[in-house]
Amino acid sequence: MNSLQPILKRCKENPILTREDVPYPVATVHNAGVVEHNGRYIMLFRSHLLNGRSVIGRADSEDGFSFKVHPKPFLTPSMDGVFGEYEAFGVEDMRVSRVDDAYLLSYSAYSRHGVRVALARTRDFEQVERIALITQADLRNVVFFPEKFGGRYARLDRPHSEISPWSIWISYSPDLVHWGDSQVVMKPLAYHWDEMKIGPGAPPFKTDKGWLHIYHGVFETMSGSVYRLGAALHDLDEPATIIAVSDQWILQPEDPWEISGYVPNVVFTCGAVPEADGTVKIYWGGADTVMCAGTAVIKDIVSLCLSDSRPAL
Ligand code: BMA
């Protein structure tokens, strides 16, 4: 892979969604979960409101690249009960996974108590049912596997720690509410593009060689952090086992709207849509300001993981 023949090809219409496309006042459009539903692509994107707190908006598309935003936000902080207490500072970075006959929505819930992850569910993207706060503080970036393992749901997540660089963990649940059997599956690698911290990105999707997970990794430079995207393959039956992690990143900030914006030098994914033709559409926020998309051939990413692999732990 090199920048002349990238494995992940940027869409020439990038950025595909900006704040100018949103019919209510927002400062940014970024970090969106995306899923295919009834032949349409649904994007659930984060926006900073003009007070600096975030809400989730919805945009729909026929082709996965050209999106139209709904007139009202899809999810705003709850005003009631336990969700009201823990979402008061905003809702961020939603991921969407189809599991069984419903879509699971996980998002960061910010409050004066820290950041934790909430789980909601929808079947039609009209009615949204909040289910539970599924982590304590401080933890972000929950993505669900689309299938169960031994009857249990599985998720990847990213706890915060002062002892270890922030790493990717797996947890299981019989009912989506109670989670446990947690273990670390992948850690940042010293003096490497993801040495500072890593976190789950898009929900993993199935390939014939394993579950492919596009994650984010961060490197600290003299002028701040650089967020890039990488790829890891998890065992199909035992997702806690990582088969391979690509030594190289698959995307780094290069376009002007990735290098400069609300937070410079950031590409951050919350969603990828695998297609029947063997390609995958990958979506990322550029500089926490705009939404971008690109496509890759799935087997090229899998081959990169398998042919040029670094240790997971
Ligand atoms: C992370 C999260 C993301 C954000 C990224 C870059 O810590 O806050 O939502 O995209 O930083 O600013």
Image (cartoon, rainbow, N blue to C red):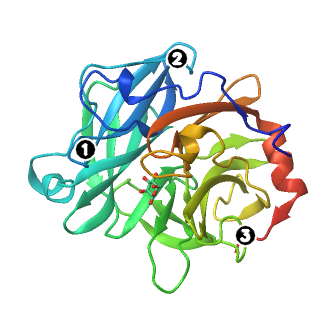
Q: Amino acid at mark 2?
A: Ser
Task: State how far apart marks 3 and 1 are (Cα).
Answer: 39 Å
**Residue 284 location in percent, x, y?**
55, 40
Q: Quadrant of residue 115?
A: bottom left
In the rendered image, which residue does mark 1 sit on?
130
Tell me, for residue 192, which label it has, or none. 3
Q: Secondary structure at mark 1?
A: strand
Task: State how far apart marks 2 and 3 are (Cα).
Answer: 35 Å
Tell me, for residue 66, which label it has, or none. 2
Instruction: Say if mark 2 contacts mark 3, CB within 8 Å.
Output: no
Q: Quadrant of ligand 1?
A: bottom left
Name the residue: 28% across, 34% down: 26
Q: Amino acid at mark 3?
A: His
The first of marks 2 and 3 along the sequence is: 2
Point out the residue furthest to the right here. 307
* Residue 209 in the figure: left or right of residue 271: right
Would you say residue 271 is visible in this rendering?
A: no
